[in-house]
Image (spheres, rainbow, N blue to C red):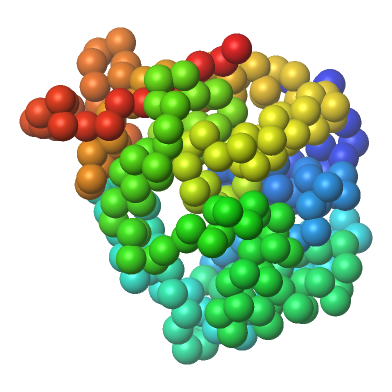
Amino acid sequence: MLLSSFSETALTALELQASTYERTGVTFVELLSLLAGTKKLVRLVINPDRLLEVEKSMALAGLQVAISPKELVTSQGNMNGDKFQEWSSLTGRMPRAIYISQDRQISELAASLDSKGDDASFADLLGYPKCCYSAYDPSRYRNWWYWISHATRNKSNLPSTMNRISRLYSQASFLYDYFPCSLDCSASTLLAEFNRTILLTHGCIELVSKWDSLQSGRFLIFPDCVMKHTEHGWKNKFGLELDRDYKDAIKLEFRFP
């Protein structure tokens, strides 16, 4: 990745991302958006041995951090490798959520809203589209990708920027860390395109080109797993070809214009 073209703000976002040990592209996009002033709040989940270093790194960048009063434990998972978390009592051994903002009042408010379960107000601070957080339903954890795909109308010609499924097999993501209500959600599409423009504005041209390629492709969505078309056939995120009747799957195709 060509870093020499990155703006100073983008380089700072990369440094902050490195301090968290989080390698996903969505973390970089969120931190860059926060530093650029287009996002109010970033929420990350950090292991206890990293909390102090992350807090120091954010402070050096002029950012304000609040830490959840409780810990997070994995409560559910699925065949795609997704893990879903819930609050647990403080022991000092499990990850905690941190809330990062340029405004201390916002970070502290976010910590309070999240721990109290005020999802609508919290999602609004995070910049998530209302239609998406209103559609969020924890009971769909195990087949969330199938539900989102089923709710998607234009399944054969989706913009590559909206390939939220790409998070399963790559670090690419133009969206923030939320589940859109569908993969052709108009509000999420605008947000993804806006974030792509922010990346280009800050010199991340090679990165954007790579993500455009990674997020294009064809997928089969089953109730319990996702498969991607590769040069060696249909594979899940672990590189396995499962014994399935592909005619029963929802078929999706993401294209870069």
Question: Considering only vertical position in the picture, is 232 above or below 188?
Answer: above
Q: Quadrant of residue 222?
A: top left
Q: Quadrant of residue 121?
A: bottom right
Q: Quadrant of residue 145?
A: top left
- At x 34%, y 71%, the residue is 75
- Residue 77 position, x and y percent, is 30, 59
The answer to whether 238 appears left or right of 71 in the picture is: left
- At x 79%, y 52%, the residue is 39
- Residue 233 position, x and y percent, is 23, 16
In this view, which residue lies farthest toward the front? 153
- Residue 73 position, x and y percent, is 41, 73
Looking at the picture, tell me which residue is in the foreground, 127 or 46: 127
- At x 62%, y 69%, the residue is 120
The answer to whether 229 appears left or right of 151 in the picture is: left
Looking at the picture, tell me which residue is in the foreground, 187 or 6: 187
Question: Considering only vertical position in the picture, is 75 above or below 115?
Answer: above
Is residue 158 something that shows in the picture? yes
